[in-house]
Amino acid sequence: MLSAFGRAFKTPDLRRKLLFTLGIITLYRLGTHIPVPGVSYTLVQQCVEGADTSSGFLGLANLFSGGAMLNISIFALGIMPYITASIIVQLLTVVIPRFEALKKEGQAGQAKMTQYTRYLTIALAVLQSATLITFARNPSQLFGNPGCTNILVDDSLVTILIMVLTMTAGTGLIMWLGELVTDKGVGNGMSILIFTSIAAYFPTSLNQIRQSDGWDVFLAVIAVGFLIIALVVFVEQSQRRIPVQYAKRMVGRQMYGGTSTYIPLKVNMAGVIPVIFASSLIMLPVMIAQFNTPALGVDPPTWVRLVNEYFGGSGSHPVYMISFVALILFFTFFYVSITFNPTEVADNMKRYGGFIPGIRAGRPTAQYLSYVLNRITVPGAIYLALISLIPLIALRLINADQNFPFGGTSILIIVGVGLETLKQIESQLQQRHYEGFLR
């Protein structure tokens, strides 16, 4: 692998793409440390030291921004608005006929869908930046640190508008950087920026484990981490291949068809989307409860107390875990059902003379595909739920506080993006008859 990596740098155009990607990553990481105008950087750092980002939507958003969110930097929103916009547009494809028609138009339709995603990203960035600034005016709730004081130098209307504009512009710049990596770099620009944000979090988390729990727990965490990575790689690469045979047919004087191929159905077809959906939805009651928390000395309503008890804190309550698993299972089946349409696949196969050996074309093929898809989605959903519960359960077994990095959304994205990037470099190396990364 190392020798192949060296040969990749010896190839001029591939070396140029790799260096360009590294330059964009460096620029992105520098932007996470530039504070927004109107914020005291010193007070923010004092609040971050005692912040509770172990779980919940705040921790997820801070993870995707590479720590920029709690630093209140120009890249505070990170890539989250774009991820949310992409998911919304993808879901609307099933609901809005216009979007469904654009999806079938090929590259031109995809370009139009990308443009809609950009517009929605900017709109969400304005909304999320305003929400973040609202919480920043009460930093004890934002950071989960009761000793945190006011971090805004000036909370006038003009300053707040400048902060919203700066964060929104930062999101637009991140979106542009990601597209540059896609066009001129190694590809998968947005995914690589997410990968960078999460990977930047690992050294800090591991160092905190070493300082608080000692070398024994630190080495145990590393060993468990390698085991989890191996498991995730195995499942992410697993797929059910359904054989497809195309009959021979005459078109004019040419003979077409007569080939064999397969439909690859991955065990985890939903990817990390169900975990993101579940994490966002399960934190809604906590956010609503925060807005209904009374002043000091006044007893909160019963429902606020129950929400904080069951869903607040580190998420170690059994009700939280059961609800989280149930949401992941639901969103896994829901997302797979809207992204893979067995009836559409069966119709396309029938149109081009394809069939599954032993299965009649048309409706029986759709029923067979649906049956196989449901059977492989069950272990895929259970796998996502188990990986997501690792930070909540495995930590208690090894006493690693709340800094366990090898689990949940982070490890799924790290492994998934890493495998996809290596495959793209592999394909470019194969074009030049070089030995690649993956065998």
Image: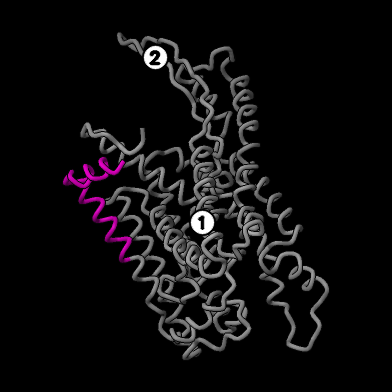
Frontmost residue, 64 versus 45? 45
Q: Residue at x 46, y 59 (%)?
A: 198
Q: Amino acid at mark 2?
A: Gly
Please tell me whether residue 19 belongs to the stretch shown in magenta. yes
Q: What is the quadrant of the N terminus in the image?
A: top left
Quarter-of-image position of residue 26: bottom left
Query: Disc 1 designates what residue?
Result: 219
Q: Position of residue 334 (x, y in %)?
A: 63, 43
Note whether residue 311 is visible. yes
Mark 2 crowd level (few <14, some 14–19, many ≥20, 10 Å Cα): some
Note whether residue 84 is visible. no
Q: Residue at x 61, y 57 (%)?
A: 391
- Front of the two marks 2 and 1: 1
Helix, strand or loop for disc 2: loop
Q: Residue at x 40, y 83 (%)?
A: 37
Q: Residue furthest right?
A: 302
Q: Position of residue 338 (x, y in %)?
A: 58, 41
Which of the numbered marks, if any, corresponds to residue 394? none
Q: How is the image coloured?
A: one colour
> Which region shows up in magenta?
1-27
Frontmost residue, 396 versus 70? 396
Helix, strand or loop for disc 1: helix
Query: Disc 2 designates what residue?
Result: 257
Q: Is residue 347 left or right of residue 370?
A: left
Label 2 – label 1 distance at C-alpha: 56 Å
Quarter-of-image position of residue 24: bottom left
Q: Position of residue 89 (x, y in %)?
A: 51, 51
Residue 159 drawn above or below residue 124: below
Q: What is the quadrant of the C terminus in the image?
A: top left
Q: Residue at x 73, y 77 (%)?
A: 292
Please tell me whether residue 258 belongs to the stretch shown in magenta. no
Q: Which of the marked residues, 2 or 1, is nearer the chain's N terminus?
A: 1
